[in-house]
Image: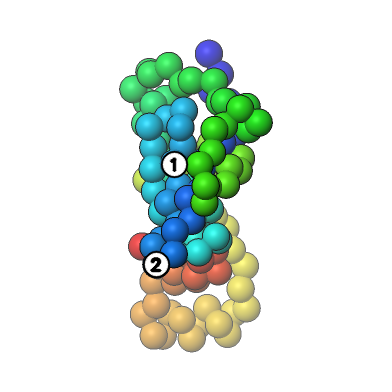
Amino acid sequence: MKKPDKYVYPAVFTYEDGYEIAVVFPDLELATSGKDDSDALTMAKEALGGRLWCMEQDGDDIPAPTRLRDVVLEPGERAALVEVYMPSVRMAQVNRSVNRTVTLPAWLNAAALEKGINFSQALQSTLMNELGIIR
């Protein structure tokens, strides 16, 4: 059976003065937190993708998401839908290398070779920096 490319689940964001924003996924027994809205959403997406990937790998039944309008909230809580694109999550779990052909000016190639620069490491480092990926 083909696995879905994306999942969308409601998350409950809890705001309390002096604390990080807590994020809970009621359908998945999953929680995380973030220092501000953007960080909390990023952490929620990462946690959701990781949890669903593990469930897929283990062959667990993935529950249907609760409709957003049916999520019960307490004071200080807000609900939002969090979407995760699984092909990216799945590929991130596969730590295999792929070949890429790149073109660069001959002078730059010569200068890099002279300095003993590892092209693969330099490209990986630059791409992670550009994408905001921290390892």
Whether 103 is drawn above or below 108: the answer is above
Judged from this view, the residue extending furthest toward the front is 75
In terms of image quadrants, where is residue 7? top right
Graded by Cα atoms within 10 Å as few (under 14), some (14 to 19) or many (20 or more), the crowding at tag 2 reads: few
Q: Secondary structure at mark 2?
A: loop
Q: Secondary structure at mark 1?
A: strand
Image coordinates for residue 47, horizontal then vertical, percent: 42, 44
Whether 45 is drawn above or below 108: the answer is above
Q: Is residue 119 visible?
A: no
In the image shown, does 3 or 68 lie closer to the viewer?
68
Amino acid type for the residue under numbered disc 2: Gly
Residue identifier under label 1: 24
Residue identifier under label 2: 18
State left or right for residue 84 relative to residue 117.
right
Residue shown at the point (58%, 42%) measured from the top left: 79
Amino acid type for the residue under numbered disc 1: Val
In the image shown, does 37 or 101 lie closer to the viewer?
37
- Mark in the foreground, 1 or 2: 2
Judged from this view, the residue extending furthest toward the right is 69
